[in-house]
Amino acid sequence: MKSVPLNAYPRTAARHAGVKKLRENGRVPAVIYGRLGKPENLELKTKEIETLIHHSASEIVLVDLSVDKDSARPKRLALVQEVQHHPLTGGVLHVDFHEVAETEQVTVTIPVEAVGEAAGVKSGGGVLEHVLHKLRVRALPKDLPEVLSVDVSHLEIGQSIHIGDIKPTAGVEILGDKKLSVFAVAAPVTEAQEAAEAAAATGTAEVEMIKEKKEEGAEGAAAPAAAKGGEKAAADKGGDKKPAEKKK
């Protein structure tokens, strides 16, 4: 993975009000950490970090971080570890950097993409299932791939590509259970199967509705019965009283 230059600045604003004002002024709060130094609060230009992420294959980016006014360690190699986005606008709210060394192997999660059209889809009408969208890999920073591209063109119906089948580039190790499927081609669903599934779903819904109606009817019948029983008990209790005999 080729490193990309990025400018950063020391940050003093840490409280909510200060961070809010920072964002209003076109800056994004960030933090850098790692075993090479103590955690440090930074700020970035919003436009620069959003442009960088927009033009990257994923949010796992290797950057040459230039920290302004830091005479001791002005240059740092770091991975974009996490990016927090605004839930509505999608704008960048916060960035975590993990400082690394050029000679240190790191473990990151890389997106997986399919290359080509599966034979079972093209000629057999099958469906390509993308089972695992990301995989964990371990490598030196310079050897990290931006994305794992997997050729699926040879897959026929009923065939799969497992983690162990993927051949990474030199210096990269793919982690995880080698028997897990990443891509698979499933047989096409017939009209009869679709009709059967639809009928089963409809039948289940009708059974649930009938059950709910029965429960509601039982509750409604229980209330008058209880009231009637109470009235009868009161009547019986009143009937048991005998009239007082008149004294002669």
Image (cartoon, rainbow, N blue to C red):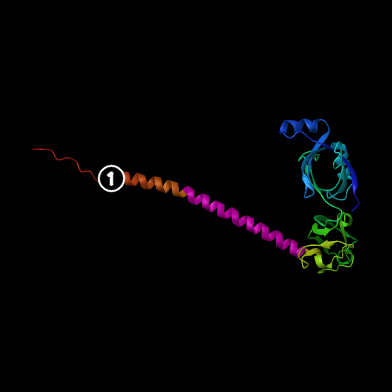
Q: Nearer the viewer, residue 190 or 111?
A: 111
Q: Amino acid at mark 1?
A: Lys
Quick one: SS at disc 1? helix
> On the picture, is 90 further left or further right than 216?
right
Q: Is residue 160 above or below residue 245?
A: below
Residue at the image position 28 percent from the left and 45 percent from the top: 237
Extent of the magenta region: 191-220
Identify the image quadrant of residue 27: top right
Pinpoint residue 117: horizontal percent, then vertical percent: 89, 62
Residue drawn at (43%, 46%) of the image = 224
Magenta span contains residue 101: no
For image coordinates 38% across by 46% down, the residue present is 228
From the viewer's perspective, is residue 145 above or below residue 235?
Answer: below
Q: Magenta stretch: residue 199 in it?
A: yes
Q: Is residue 18 above or below residue 84?
A: above
In the displayed orientation, state which residue is furthest to the left.
248
Residue 209 lies, in percent from the top left, at: 59, 53
| Residue for badge 1 | 237
Q: Is residue 5 visible?
A: yes
